[in-house]
């Protein structure tokens, strides 16, 4: 395990978010984790959708908007040729024990 350093990005519009998501999707390898943090409306779900759409391809997902936010289900799991992609939205949790 390596010590990861935070990266802060200011993405001006949805197209920029989609481009960064596609680049991130190409860089990810099986076992990698990406943690997104920011206030509500910061674009975390938009970036996650862009990554997932790029990994799965349009044939499986249609538009990135077809990828639901796991706000109420807490997690959504997708699968591509490299393995599983877990998308979790845990902002409603108030205690780490609620994950289990």
Image (cartoon, rainbow, N blue to C red):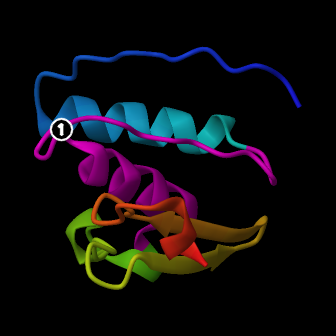
Q: Nearer the viewer, residue 94 or 37?
A: 94
Residue 42 counted in the magenta span = yes
Question: Residue at coordinates 49% horizontally, 74% vertically from top-left?
Answer: 98
Residue 32 counted in the magenta span = yes
Furthest residue to the bottom? 73
Question: Residue at coordinates 44% horizontally, 61% vertically from top-left?
Answer: 95
Image quadrant containing the C terminus: bottom right
Question: Label 1: which residue?
Answer: 39
Residue 17 location, quadrant: top left
Residue 12 location, quadrant: top left
Around disc 1, counting alpha carbons within 10 Å, would you say few (fewer than 14), some (14 to 19), or many (20 or more)?
few
Residue 53 location, quadrant: bottom left
**Position of 68 relative to 49 (above/below):** below
Left or right side of 30 for 6:
left
Q: Nearer the viewer, residue 63 or 29?
A: 29
Q: SS for tag 1?
A: loop
Image quadrant containing the N terminus: top right
**Position of 7 relative to 93 (above/below):** above
Q: Position of residue 41 (x, y in %)?
A: 10, 45
Left or right side of 22 for 66:
left
Question: Residue at coordinates 33% horizontally, 45% vertically from top-left?
Answer: 47
Image mark count: 1
Q: Nearer the viewer, residue 11 or 7?
A: 7
Question: Residue at coordinates 25% horizontally, 50% vertically from top-left?
Answer: 46
Q: Position of residue 35 (x, y in %)?
A: 51, 41
Q: Position of residue 94 (x, y in %)?
A: 35, 61
Q: Which range is magenta?
A: 29-58
């Amino acid at each position: 395990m390596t010590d990861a350093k935070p990266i802060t990005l200011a993405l001006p519009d949805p197209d920029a978010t989609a481009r960064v998501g596609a680049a991130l999707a190409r860089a990810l390898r099986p076992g990698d984790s990406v943690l997104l943090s920011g206030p509500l409306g910061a674009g975390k779900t938009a970036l996650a959708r862009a990554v997932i759409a790029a990994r799965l391809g349009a044939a499986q997902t249609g538009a990135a908007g077809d990828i639901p936010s796991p706000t109420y289900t807490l997690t959504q799991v997708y699968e591509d040729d490299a393995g599983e992609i877990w998308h979790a939205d845990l902002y409603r949790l108030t205690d780490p024990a609620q994950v289990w």
